[in-house]
Amino acid sequence: QVRLVESGGGLVQPGGSLRLSCAASRSIFSITAMGWHRQTPGNQRELVAGFRSGGVTDYADSVKGRFTISRDNAKNTVYLQMNMLKPEDTAVYYCNADFTGRRYWGQGVQVTVSS
């Protein structure tokens, strides 16, 4: 089982930056894949950025060049650095971890981009 605790959301103006953190309850070396999804009301959850096995990194086209996913293995934490934020980035952001064939989710953090 994996417990995920997210932090770092909030309100930011367009063009600003935020960094989200996702702390896992176990070593992330043992986790097959980790990443970030986001969801807006009435819409499905969509992948924002993620690590897959073999060190492959995926990004949604809408965030390429603006968002960067990274990890600190010693802290069992995955980060999402979000720069040049746009109002359309407003959503609840969820961290996910794929472990032993099951996907685990964090509680979600609200990111609001507005002037």
Image: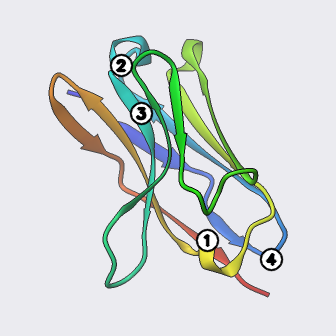
Q: Decide: marks 4, 2 in contact (CB < 8 A)?
A: no
Q: Residue, x 34% and y 78% (percent of image)? A: 43
Q: Which residue is mark 1?
A: 89
Mark 4 or 2: the one toward you? 4
Considering depth in this image, is 18 or 46 the residue closer to the camera?
46
Disc 2 crowd, CA 10 A, few/some/many (<14, 14-19, 20+): some
Q: CA distance from mark 4 to mark 1?
A: 11 Å
Residue 111: x and y, percent?
A: 59, 68
Question: Which disc is residue 34 wearing?
Answer: 3
Q: Amino acid at mark 3?
A: Met
Question: Which disc is residue 26 wearing?
Answer: 2
Disc 4 crowd, CA 10 A, few/some/many (<14, 14-19, 20+): some
Q: Amino acid at mark 4?
A: Gln
Q: Going from the N terminus, do you reach mark 3 or mark 2 first?
A: 2
Q: Secondary structure at mark 2?
A: loop
Q: Which residue is mark 4?
A: 13
Residue 31: x and y, percent?
A: 34, 20
Position of residue 32 in the picture relative to residue 94 (left or right):
left
Q: CA distance from mark 3 to mark 2?
A: 12 Å
Q: Secondary structure at mark 1?
A: helix
Q: Residue, x 42% and y 12% (percent of image)? A: 29
